[in-house]
Image: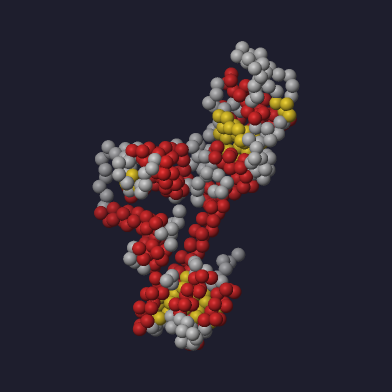
């Protein structure tokens, strides 16, 4: 299916210029025309164009309305609209003013159609990117209402969608992934989105409790069931009744306990250690593992029937190294959180620290990143967090890099800081940097700077 053409609105009181621009752009875009203020506003509301070429001096407008006034109204209708002001040489000052007021760019008459086509093409492409960023941010904001999971990468958005979907059912879920990828957070998110959200969420690490105690922890015991059983005790299953039980490191469960867990998943009944009564329970089970359970099944180290019972739905939590710029997003979130906890304001990463965070492999995943940022906030002696504050080796002989590379790294980080301070508003950022929006967009493209 062919991609829908972008929409262009040409606003000019000179029919010849409107026609000229129309024929230049109509092969690549859906082009409409307006000769005055009222019609331009009407078409902007009805057709929702992606870009407007606007004569800065619409002589047919009454009540001293001007192109600048129309620009203001158009940007109220659509703040992400790209507006190219068409101006005469004597109107350059007004054109510069229009850029400060939100126009994408201006173009001076006489019109060179090939040059105008290039400006339009770039503006339309940038609008598409901005709308994609907006959509991504909205999705991320929506997803993050239900948990502390942070991420905007494609792989994490897929995880969010799966969590959304499985939370509506009562099926067992198996969360897989390396240690530190956020499996327990995902299990809490599933619980918090489900109809069980007002009931208990009980978590237990099957690998952290000795085997001889784990059965009692899970299923409870009766008085006198063993030497130290001086009273009846409920297990995690009973405490999770009508709620959710999260079994972490399920791959470490012994065969006898695998049998008891399988029996519960089949019958929804448990029996306390030393007891003879079957207890009916309503518990949703979510399990997690950093091991390859299918491999354990092949090696006869995990029951195949239990594996299939647990993995009705499987969600794989991606390692941090596969999540792109999520690592920078997470680093900034952790920095803000721990700086507030430690009453240290104004902390930032040096460009070298950002570079190390990006290039590091993160074998400990999000948990390792969190610990490194916490360490850095505690140890930093000024406002700038360096690689050594993060625990990266500083004793290595530093490679001497080309001067141009260092300059570009500093420029890239300066632009990112300016964008963050101005909440990613391109016009305000360009003004703060004392450059044009066009130049700023070119630099963002050069350094692959995208909204986080």
| Image spot of residue 91 (x, y percent) | 37, 81
Picture coordinates of residue 431, whole percent (x, y): 36, 66
Say which residue appears at 37% left-offset and 65% top-offset. 430
Q: Residue furthest front?
A: 343
Q: Nearer the viewer, residue 45 or 387?
A: 45
Q: Residue 321's image quarter?
A: top left
Asked if residue 202 lies left or right of residue 382, the reply is: right
Q: In this view of the protein, which residue sits in the foreground, 344 or 277?
A: 344
| Residue 33 seen in render | no
Q: Residue at x 45, y 79 (%)?
A: 67
Q: Is residue 447 above or below residue 236?
A: below
Figure coloring: secondary structure
Task: Say left or right for 231 vs 395.
Answer: right
> Is residue 318 at all visible to an observer of this figure?
yes
Q: Is residue 223 above or below residue 51?
A: above
Total number of numbered labels? 0
Q: Position of residue 296 (x, y in %)?
A: 58, 30
Residue positioned 47% across, 43% down in the render: 320
Residue at the location (74% across, 24% down)? 278
Vertical comparison of 15 with 30: above or below? below
């Amino acid at each position: 299916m062919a991609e829908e053409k972008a929409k262009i609105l040409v606003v000019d009181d000179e029919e010849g210029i409107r026609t000229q621009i129309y024929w230049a752009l109509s092969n690549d875009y859906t082009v409409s025309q307006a000769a005055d203020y009222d019609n331009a506003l009407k078409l902007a509301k009805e057709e929702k164009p992606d870009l407007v070429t606007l004569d800065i001096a619409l002589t047919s407008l009454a009540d001293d309305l001007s192109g600048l006034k129309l620009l203001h109204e158009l940007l109220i209708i659509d703040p992400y609209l790209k507006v190219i002001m068409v101006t005469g040489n004597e109107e350059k000052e007004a054109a510069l003013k229009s850029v400060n007021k939100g126009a994408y760019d201006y173009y001076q008459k006489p019109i060179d159609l090939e040059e105008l086509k290039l400006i339009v093409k770039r503006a339309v492409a940038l609008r598409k990117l901005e709308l994609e960023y907006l959509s991504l941010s909205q999705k991320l904001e929506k997803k993050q209402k239900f948990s502390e999971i942070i991420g905007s990468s494609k792989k994490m958005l897929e995880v969010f969608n799966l969590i959304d979907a499985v939370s509506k059912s009562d099926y067992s879920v198996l969360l897989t992934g390396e240690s530190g990828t956020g499996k327990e957070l995902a299990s809490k998110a599933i619980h918090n989105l489900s109809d069980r959200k007002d009931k208990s969420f009980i978590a237990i690490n099957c690998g952290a409790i000795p085997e001889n105690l784990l059965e009692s922890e899970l299923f409870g015991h009766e008085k006198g069931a063993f030497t130290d059983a001086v009273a009846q005790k409920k297990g995690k299953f009973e405490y999770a009744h009508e709620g959710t039980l999260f079994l972490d490191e399920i791959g470490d469960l012994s065969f006898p306990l695998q049998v008891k867990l399988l029996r519960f998943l089949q019958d929804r009944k448990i029996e306390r250690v030393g007891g003879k009564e079957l207890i009916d329970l309503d518990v949703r089970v979510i399990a997690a593992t950093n091991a390859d359970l299918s491999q354990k099944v092949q090696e006869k180290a995990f029951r195949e029937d239990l594996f299939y019972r647990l993995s009705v739905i499987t969600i794989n939590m991606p390692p941090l190294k596969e999540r792109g710029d999520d690592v920078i997003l997470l680093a900034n979130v952790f920095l803000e959180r721990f700086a507030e906890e430690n009453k240290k304001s104004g902390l930032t990463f040096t460009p070298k620290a950002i570079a190390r965070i990006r290039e590091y492999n993160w074998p400990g995943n999000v948990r390792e990143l969190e610990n490194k940022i916490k360490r850095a906030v505690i140890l930093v002696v000024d406002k700038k967090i360096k690689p050594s504050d993060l625990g990266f080796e500083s004793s290595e002989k530093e490679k001497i890099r080309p001067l141009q590379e260092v300059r570009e790294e500093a420029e890239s980080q300066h632009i990112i800081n300016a964008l963050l301070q101005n909440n990613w508003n391109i016009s305000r950022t360009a003004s703060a940097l004392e450059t044009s929006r066009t130049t700023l967009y070119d630099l963002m493209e050069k350094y692959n700077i995208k909204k986080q």
